[in-house]
Image: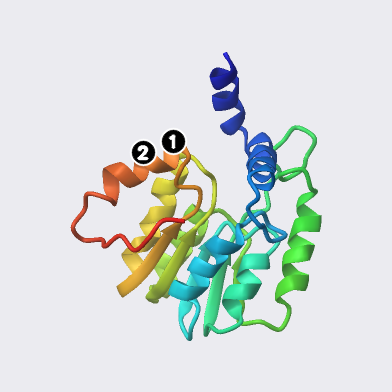
Amino acid sequence: MKKQIRKILLKIPFFYTKIHRLHKKLSGIDLNEEGVAKEELSFLLRHMGSKRVVMEIGSFGGQTTKRLAENNKLVIAIDPYIPNSEDGTLNGEYPKEVYSRFMKNNIGKNVLLFPMTSEQAFNIWDKNIKQKIDSIFVDGLHTYDAVKIDFRWSKYLSVGGVIAFHDTNLPEIKKFLDRHILNNSKYKFLEKN
């Protein structure tokens, strides 16, 4: 019964975020303000953090974006800032507040924000821009279908580029990776945090 309830709650982004943060806090993992473990951020900075064009799908308040922007040419951030609960909040905060925090965190940085879904941004990019991207961090919606949409961006990944996925322990993301990435000789597995 407990596992069934947890499965249901994990499908609801608001509860997932609260559970995820609580679980990481209880397990002693050090988090930044956005709930990203410092070891995960360290991984991103090691593999994506120097004079590159980087994309972050799911930028939320922009803490990770800010860190990625410190040493890169450009960070392309994508987040629609759409409420995901009945009370009009986004992971427990009002979307305007999250968007405002993103802007404060990244003012004066080499950051290009697409305040829209990954699919909408991809369609614009695919039709008009078509520039290669050196690294992609996928941390949008944590569903199989959403990750599949986000993965379309790999079309623009530079040769030797890095694509990183957040929360790979979640069943939907693990399922996508198992089906499309881990057994595909086109990709080389670097490491897992």
Q: For this view, does 187 lie left or right of residue 165?
A: left
In the rendered structure, the answer to whether residue 11 lies left or right of residue 105 reads: left
Closer to the camera, 177 or 127?
177
Q: What amino acid type should be assigned to the residue bearing mark 1?
A: Pro
Q: In this view of the protein, which residue sits in the foreground, 171 or 56?
A: 171
Q: Is residue 72 above or below residue 40?
A: below
- Assess disc 1: are there few (<14), some (14-19) or many (≥20) residues with their C-alpha within 10 Å of its C-alpha: some
Q: Residue drawn 57% across and 74% down?
A: 68
In the depicted view, which residue is nearer to us: 109 or 24?
A: 24
Q: Which residue is mark 2?
A: 175
Name the residue located 73 percent from the left edge and 78 percent from the top edge: 107
The quadrant where residue 101 appears: bottom right
Q: Quadrant of the N terminus?
A: top right
Against 35, residue 69 (above or below) is below
| Marks 2/1: CA–CA distance | 6 Å
Disc sitting over residue 60 in the figure: none
Q: Residue 193: horizontal and vertical position, in percent?
A: 46, 56
Q: Which residue corresponds to mark 1?
A: 171
Determine the image quadrant of residue 12: top right
In the rendered image, the residue lying farthest to the top is 1
Q: Is residue 54 left or right of residue 106?
A: left
Q: Position of residue 108 (x, y in %)?
A: 71, 84
Circle 1 SS class: helix
Residue 7 percent across, percent down from the top left: 54, 26
| Secondary structure of residue under mark 2 | helix
What residue lies at 43% left-to-right and 43% top-to-bottom?
Answer: 173
- Say if mark 2 contacts mark 1, CB within 8 Å: yes
Q: Amino acid at mark 2?
A: Lys
**Residue 153 rendering spot, x and y as whole percentages:** 39, 61
